[in-house]
Amino acid sequence: MSPLTSQAQYRPSEFARLAGVTVRALHHYDQLGLLKPSSRTAAGYRLYGPPDIARLQQIVTLKFIGFSLREIKRLLAGADLRAALSLQRNTLGQKRRRLDLAIAAIAQAERVLSHRAGPNWEAFAKIIEVIQMQANTDWTKKYYNAAAQKLLAKRQKLWSPKLQAESQTKWAALLKQIEQAARNKVEPASPEAQALAERHEQLIESFTGGHASIRQGLAELWKDRAHWPAAFKRQVFEPFSRRGIRTARRADPAFLTEPGRKFLEAAFRARWTSKYFNHEAREILSDGHGLWSPELQSQWTALRKDIETAAQKGMDPAGPTARALTRRHAKLMESLTGGNASLREGLARVWKDRANWPTEFLSKAGGAFLKAALKAGKPRKDEV
């Protein structure tokens, strides 16, 4: 980019030419709040000067190394640049490794072709598989927050094809035993069912390393499996199809049948309630009401989403939106217990032990917003 004199003021077309960008880009950056002109003419036309060139250099530099405009805006507003650069370096390193694999596969195909009269379609299939692997992993990032992506990058270095195969074999064996237990109508709270639930937890933890942020991202990824690319779906389910998991062969593949899934869910409910609730509370919860009511679960999901939105928009924790959210929170807490002391005591134990929850109910920002909103003032009785 050409240097600007210390007192110079330029209209968009002149500034774009000197800076080596397009006028359209300048307008787009202005609309996003990334680069506002330092002044305007009496008629309202934009004027750019030396401070703007420094800002534009920052934008161009961050854009060159792969940050999106949304990420750049956050970084220029004061986000942790060092942490973001570390994450971006890991991301680019992963892309480089996948490109190296693709280059190696192409080189192998070239070597095969040099010794054959016709093309080796198996070699070309391998190239396609490797390139698809690149596409099939990049898109999953949207399900993981920045902390989870950084942790995943570190854990990926510990993973190997051998460990992957061993994990798939263990999962296949567990899935078959869960299906057998469901067919035998094993009691979900029994030692046998709880042993299966514990093995399930251990296998999940072998991937997440016990990190709640990774587990939350994994849960979000799995909930959205209807939108998985076909190649990624094959990559996930085909190893299990080869290991005898029949549901993995269906047009809409799954790891468990519906009875198997319901049995596992019931085993986890029994595992969770036995940890925090006494016998009286467990009897109440076993009838399908309270914590496990589909209606209440739906309301909790909606509340969680609205809290996250309020946190992202930077709303005032003491403002009317926050108070409306705390009222909804209070009503749901009352609906959960129905005024029962045993349920209230159990929920208090659940909340006290929230650092050990397997998944995060809210992001750090969402949790901080809710905590601040509750601290700002409990809803009056006439508001509940």
Image: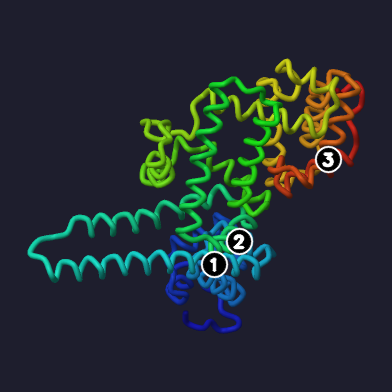
Amino acid at pointer 3:
Ala
Q: Earlier in the sequence, mark 2 or mark 3?
A: 2
- Most distant residue in the left direction: 117
Q: Position of residue 218 (x, y in %)?
A: 57, 45
Query: Dividing the image into 4 quarters, which one contains the C terminus?
Result: top right
User: Which label number is shown at residue 150?
Assistant: 2
Considering only vertical position in the picture, is 157 above or below 241?
Answer: below
Query: Dots 2 and 3: beta carbons under 8 Å?
Result: no
Mark 1 element type: helix
Q: Secondary structure at mark 2?
A: helix
Q: Nearer the viewer, residue 143 or 211?
A: 211
Tell me where residue 212 appears, x and y as whole percent.
68, 49
3D distance between C-alphas at marks 1 and 3: 36 Å
Give the SS element for disc 3.
helix
Q: Which residue is mark 3?
A: 373
Density class for disc 2 (Cα within 10 Å; few <14, some 14-19, many ≥20) is some
Residue assigned mark 1: 90
Q: CA distance from mark 2 to mark 3?
A: 30 Å
